[in-house]
Image (spheres, rainbow, N blue to C red):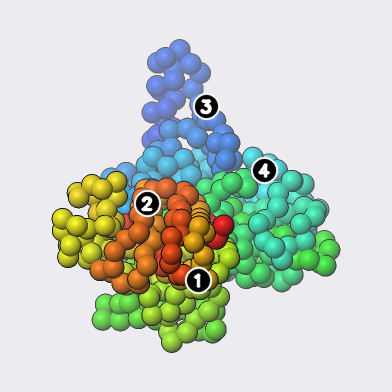
Amino acid sequence: MNMVTHKMTPLLVGLVSALLVLGACSDEENGLPGGNHSQEDPDTGLDVDDIDDADTSGEPDVDEVDDVGADTDVSEDPDTDFDADTGNGEEEYPQLISGPCGPMMALGVLEWGEDTTLDIDMDDFDNNLHTHCDEALGDGDVALFRFQTPPLETGELVVTADGMAGELRIGSCHDDALNFGCSVETVHAPLQPGTTYFLLLEPLEDNSQESFELHLEFEELPTCPAEDFETGSCIDESTIEVCNVTQYSPDAVRVYSAECPSGQCVNDRCVGDSCDDPIFVTTNFHWEGRNLGHFANHNSLDEVEQEQENATCLIDDDPNFPAESWGRELVFEVDDLSPGDEIVVTVDAEHPDQLRVIFKEDCSSTASCLAVSAGEQTSSYQVDDEDRIFVFVDTFFDFDQYFDLSIEVQ
């Protein structure tokens, strides 16, 4: 096993020391013995004390992503308490520790340019976890890893583990945690600053291997020229590489790759990116992942502005609350419908308050809305005499979103 040492900067060491002194004085003044009275967060397995250990003491939140619902304020986030109180300012990683979901390998705080290879023994993990991956064995232990991203630095993670199915969970190791969906042998994802992640690796079907090699790379997301904004290219038949702004770096145009929701990349766009090439659904559709490879091509606010008094794309018939959707929509065409059919859309979104689900008979920004919902996990439309309906799963802001999405015709 290769050991990786993460060193704290002198500034952070000084801040931690000062906080420890202040904390001890405060305890003694209140009649309590000095020292660290930390508690463990049940989800992350991290110490939850005053959390100021990871505060950068006045450094601004450079991305200002609070405007779009992302929580990257490292001074108040328990996920950013990186066990910095070690006395000598260093912590040895990786290390096998006991966590809220059983034994797990703690990898510490990732750093740009990190390239780590580990020999993993499945006997080290005794838990009841399972990934949501259909390709996984579904029986036996799951290798579990915990790591954090730097408080003010985003990056792109690539994990390779032959013979394994992988699932990356956000903020919690439990089965109900938000996740990036399943991957086979290679996990590839851009990561948000100052966040705790859990990586689950489970053997593929017909694979009973007791050990495997894990290779982990963490690199800075490359930037691209502003004039290339909203350009893309198909890397292969299912993967797109795009130049776009992400929620992780709203102040910079970034290059990143993403799997298309339908598994199809055509003419340098993911199928389902616009009305030009929607995802066809006849009975049901299910997908988990992020809309990283999509662009903002549709906005039902156009119909509201055009029609004014008779606008249909309103939420609760409130003229001050249109179904404005500047975000990256997924476009579906539901076909072969019969009168009385019900289209049910279920979405577990990372930021549900930004979620918009819109039903239309025609696929354009100025077309009338048959039904609109905002912030609802389940939305539906009962077919009258239409033989096809267009469904838009959209977000209020032009930032990427995590979705666990299903469409079913009942």
Which residue occupies the foreground of this view, 234 or 123? 234
The residue that mark 1 highlights is: 335
Instruction: Name the side, left or right, on which 313 lies relative to 236.
Output: left
Q: What residue type is labelled 3?
A: His
Q: SS for tag 4?
A: loop
The image quadrant that residue 395 belongs to is: bottom left
Counting residues from the start of the chain, the first of labels 1 and 3 encountered is 3
Which residue occupies the foreground of this view, 391 or 21? 391
Which residue occupies the foreground of this view, 157 or 284? 284
Instruction: Name the side, left or right, on which 380 lies relative to 179.
Output: left
How far is the residue under mark 4 from the one under mark 2? 36 Å
Query: Do tag 2 and tag 1 residues touch (Cβ < 8 Å)?
Result: no
Q: Which amino acid does label 4 sit on?
A: Cys
Residue 307: in sight, yes or no? yes
Which residue is at a point 75% across and 50% down the rendered structure image?
Answer: 125
User: Which percent across, then down, holds residue 245?
Assistant: 33, 68
Q: What residue type is labelled 2?
A: Ser
Foreground mark, 4 or 1, reads 1
Disc assigned to residue 373: 2
Instruction: Name the side, left or right, on which 102 lies relative to 173.
Output: right
Disc assigned to residue 37: 3
Foreground mark, 1 or 3, reads 1
The residue that mark 4 highlights is: 101
